[in-house]
Amino acid sequence: MSTRFIDVPALAQLLQRVGLQPFIEGLAAAIEEDFRRWPDFDKTARLASHSPQGVIELMPVAGSARYAFKYVNGHPGNPARGLPTVMAFGALADVDTGMPVLLAELTLTTALRTAATSALAARALARPGARCMALIGCGAQAEFQALAFHALLGVAELRVHDRDGAAVDKLAHNLAPWRGLQVHRCADAAEAVRGADVVTTATADKRHAHVLLPAMVEPGMHLNAVGGDCPGKTELHPDVVRAARVFVEYAPQTRVEGEIQQMPAGFPVTELWQVLSGRAPGRTGAQEVTLFDSVGFALEDYAALGFVQALAAAHGVGREVELVPQAPDPKDLFGLALGTAAGLRRAA
């Protein structure tokens, strides 16, 4: 048995065959299905190794049949070196045997699953009929967020701001083919959020930033905080968090890494799976401000890896690799190393 390998060109090929928006819609459905089965999974907060430059993390999760992990980094200074801020890969394995069945890139897929999860949460938490989104930060995640909200919520107006004008130019160029999505450039964050139904913050600085201030928040807004995802890195003023009804992926992890790291222990939050499974209410009124404090969780990658595996098999994308030994005698590892294993000699 071999391992299916999906590298970046293979994932791009799969996206081109399926279509970007259908891919995001299918991925959101896969994530929702697994979130509804939340109690069935063995979960833990990710393991992080921090440095002044960024963070490197391992994200494991296991179900009854499959185990998954992701390796991912977050280094805000990387673009100046010609490298992505986030780079990732991951694996999916059978629990019964430990055999890795999929090895895949997860840099593109992480952007896709983050956007799909954001839009999935907003579909459950934003006011019905939300059609205008403010997007603060136009980096690598921005277009995926825009298209996910366009596909899952019907967002038609995008009000964008980034202190890097070239990033705004990039986003406007990339989204130009989507005629149902109008992009408006705004001079600052305050202008961008004015009158928006949804506000997405997706900045990358590794610091406690105040991208969104209390005076900018209007009754009924849904806030989607994506950029604050490690200790010492936030985007929202603490009073914005304090005044909102907060939803998270996995509370033990978010209390360390998310916007709620600014709040005292025991600050009340609701995990998203509880809303999706009907165990807790979402929005309770049109004037309520809801906040999805998103840091990314391993179960989203588990769902994404399974989704990619199924699509890749259906479309014949990727290739099989011998990631682990394939020998007639599994005990003769030494012979395999030297090319003298019995089965190999017979084959020769």
Image (spheres, grey):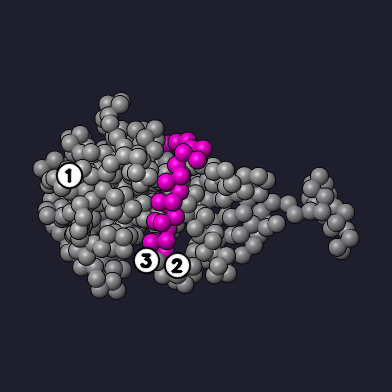
Give left or right: position of 86 versus 171.
Answer: right
Q: Distance between the residues labelled 3 and 2?
A: 9 Å
- Give the labeled residue for mark 3: 21
Which of the marked residues, 3 or 2, is nearer the chain's N terminus?
Answer: 2
Quarter of the figure that contains the C terminus: bottom right
Label 1 Cα neighbours within 10 Å, binned few <14 / some 14-19 / many ≥20: few
Q: Which amino acid does label 3 sit on?
A: Gln
- Give the labeled residue for mark 1: 285
Q: What residue type is labelled 2?
A: Leu
Quarter of the view holding residue 187? bottom left
Residue reaching furthest front? 278
* Residue in the picture at 52% in, 55% down: 306
Indicate yes or no whether the magenta region holds residue 138: no
Q: Which amino acid does label 1 sit on?
A: Gly
* Residue in the picture at 31% in, 39% down: 280
Q: Distance between the residues labelled 2 and 1?
A: 38 Å
Q: Where is residue 215 in the image (x, y as percent from the top left)?
A: 10, 43
In magenta, the rendered stretch is 23-51
Q: Is residue 262 visible?
A: yes
* Residue in the picture at 89% in, 60% down: 346
> Are the residues at dot 2 and dot 1 in contact (C-beta closer than 8 Å)?
no
Closest to the camera, between mark 2 and mark 1, is: 1
Give left or right: position of 306 versus 287.
Answer: right
Quarter of the view holding residue 164? bottom left
Quarter of the figure that contains the N terminus: bottom right
- Give the labeled residue for mark 2: 15
Q: Can residue 205 be seen in this view?
A: no
**Pick the front one: 251 or 275:** 275
Which of the marked residues, 3 or 1, is nearer the chain's N terminus?
Answer: 3
